[in-house]
Amino acid sequence: MYVDPPYYGQGKSLYRKFFNDQDHIKLSKALTKLSAPWLLSYDNCKFISHLYENQRKNVKQQSLFFDYSAGGTKKE
């Protein structure tokens, strides 16, 4: 299962419907209870990382950097 929730840091400015802290916590609890494999994409921040640390022995976190944006580039 692939899960792509609203970003944590910029959620309010990017989405009409965004998650608050409790929504992110509920999602982490639901996912870590699953026996089926899942892949989750998020922005890299301490709040989210801590939600998934030590939840389950087989939960692995990996940071990836992508140098692009679906919104295009900003000209200054």
Image (cartoon, helix red, strand yellow):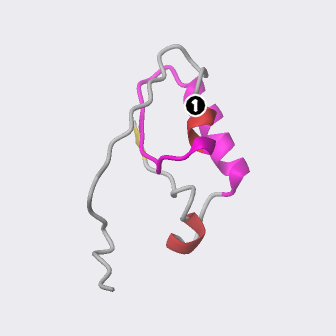
Q: Which residue is mark 1?
A: 52
Q: What's the amino acid at mark 1? A: Tyr
Left or right: 24 as drawn, with respect to 71? right
Looking at the picture, tell me which residue is in the foreground, 34 or 56. 56
Residue at x-position 33% and y-position 86%? 76
Q: Is residue 6 above or below residue 53?
A: below
Where does residue 28 sit, x and y in percent of width and height?
60, 36
Looking at the picture, tell me which residue is in the foreground, 41 or 68. 68
Residue at x-position 69% and y-position 57%? 20
Left or right: 63 as drawn, with respect to 23? left
Disc 1 element: helix
Q: Which residues are magenta?
A: 20-47
Where does residue 59 sit, x and y in percent of width and height?
48, 22
Where does residue 51 sit, x and y in percent of width and height?
63, 35
Q: Which residue in the rendered view is the most extreme toward the right?
A: 22
* The image quarter in which residue 1 lies: top left
Q: Which residue in the rendered view is the most extreme toward the front?
A: 76
Residue at x-position 50% and y-position 71%? 14
Q: Is residue 10 above or below residue 13?
A: above
Left or right: 30 as drawn, with respect to 65? right
Residue at x-position 70% and y-position 51%? 21
Q: Which residue in the rendered view is the most extreme toward the top?
A: 57
Q: Is residue 15 magenta?
A: no
Q: Is residue 45 magenta?
A: yes
Mark 1 surroundings: few (<14), some (14-19) or many (≥20) residues within 10 A: some
Q: Is residue 40 above or below residue 74?
A: above
